[in-house]
Amino acid sequence: MDSRAAPWPYADLDVAALRAGGHRPVPFREFVLKIHQRCNLACDYCYMYEHADQSWRERPRTMSDEVRDATLARIATHARTHDLSRVRIVLHGGEPLLYGPARLSSLVTAARSTLPCPVEFSMQTNGVLLTERTLAVLRTHGIAVGVSVDGTPAEHDRHRSFPSGKGSFGAVTRGLTLLQKPENQQVYGGLLCTVNASADPIACYQQLLEFAPPAIDLLLPHANWAAPPPEPVADWLIAVFDRWYGEKSPVRIRLFDDAIALVLGGAARGEQLGLSPSGVVVVESDGDIEQVDALKSAYPGACATGLNVLRDDFDPALDHPGIVARQIGRAALSDECLACPAVAFCGGGHYAHRYRPGAGFRNPSVYCADLQLFLRHVYDRVAADLNTLVGSSS
Ligand code: SF4
């Protein structure tokens, strides 16, 4: 069976009724382009290659020029239809640097001449192919680079190795050394670290800081009720949070920034916490329009919308139940989440982590207990500081 034809577990979501009740879709502002489907590493937790959905096997290795041009034309239409003042294009894979510097250059040039608004470009790479030549192209086109690093050399190499089994820390360090040079600072976007709760949290944090990143994203390993995480993550998160919170000039860590913003009554920018509507859509190398690919960790076909840029605009995807569910906030949550005192901060956690076979996504996150502990801790730290501030000013 074509895995992309699998049914959606959204039987209880009536999009027409939601529209009639006043739901207005949030246009897409972030377009993730899977420009190369293969990877030069073989990380053991990769949601593309090691989890339920194996659709990468059926897709072209590289996004063709035909699909690239159709994608840009559809983004331009979407931007014009919704009068967007800017959009973000994230170059993704597999490993996006396998696409090659010349093709990257053509893609960005074509995007800037096709789109009716400014485009912000970024890329998420494993860093192995970052060379002087590649970085010159990224600099020329203003493509911000995020690099995946999983902490100390031993921990990184345990999970992020070449197909031969050799660890990639040395190769990534070479790339990051180039990225830290003054002329490349403008394109150094930050680090992405997948949390490994069995590793020393402070050693991991300190290792990340050694690369002097402008920002760090901490990502909970993708898991769900059918494939739960190997161990609790709350203690790990709390240890790093406390070290970070006590720093004089802490680096931006989006998960922590979001947690603090939420306990202060604001909104999150990332997808791991909060109830902000998602405006992200993915285009696969064959042109398929899909949801965020973290859902690949749930079941085969979980990301599919049935749409493709060669024949469809992005607007129909805004009515797809999977996309609607990530734009309607509390209306998509389970009864347990709705009754939870932490719901305004947590928002049910990452959408992919709520999946339970037979029950779809209307469940608490599989990280529910960890999220409660972590958010309670953040709340208490921030509240204690506010109380001290109020006490000292009265
Ligand atoms: S802490 Fe658990 S029950 Fe509460 S909102 Fe988050 S996932 Fe839902």
Image (spheres, rainbow, N blue to C red):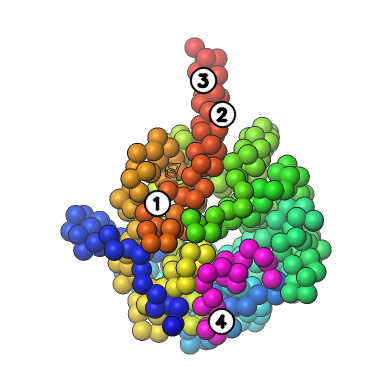
The structure residue drawn at horizontal position 59% and vertical position 41%, both measured from the top left corner, is 234
Range covered by the magenta-colored residues? 42-60
Q: Which residue is mark 2?
A: 381
Instruction: Compare marks 3 and 2 and give the one earlier in the sequence.
Output: 2
**Magenta: main secondary structure:** loop
The structure residue drawn at horizontal position 49% and vertical position 59%, both measured from the top left corner, is 226
Instruction: Kindly tell me whether residue 321 is visible in this rendering.
Output: yes
Q: CA distance from mark 4 to mark 3?
A: 55 Å
The structure residue drawn at horizontal position 69% and vertical position 71%, both measured from the top left corner, is 42
Q: CA distance from mark 3 to mark 2?
A: 10 Å
Disc 1 marks a residue whose amino acid type is: Asn
Q: Which residue is mark 3?
A: 387
Q: Which residue is mark 4?
A: 57
Q: Are marks 2 and 4 in contact (CB under 8 Å)?
A: no
Badge 2: how crowded within 10 Å, few (<14), some, or many (20+)? some
Instruction: Compare marks 2 and 4 and give the one earlier in the sequence.
Output: 4
Which element is circle 4 on?
helix
Q: Nearer the viewer, mark 3 or mark 2?
A: 2
Instruction: Compare marks 1 and 2 and give the one earlier in the sequence.
Output: 1
Disc 3 marks a residue whose amino acid type is: Asn
Q: Which residue is mark 1?
A: 363
Instruction: Kindly tell me whether residue 250 is visible in this rendering.
Output: no
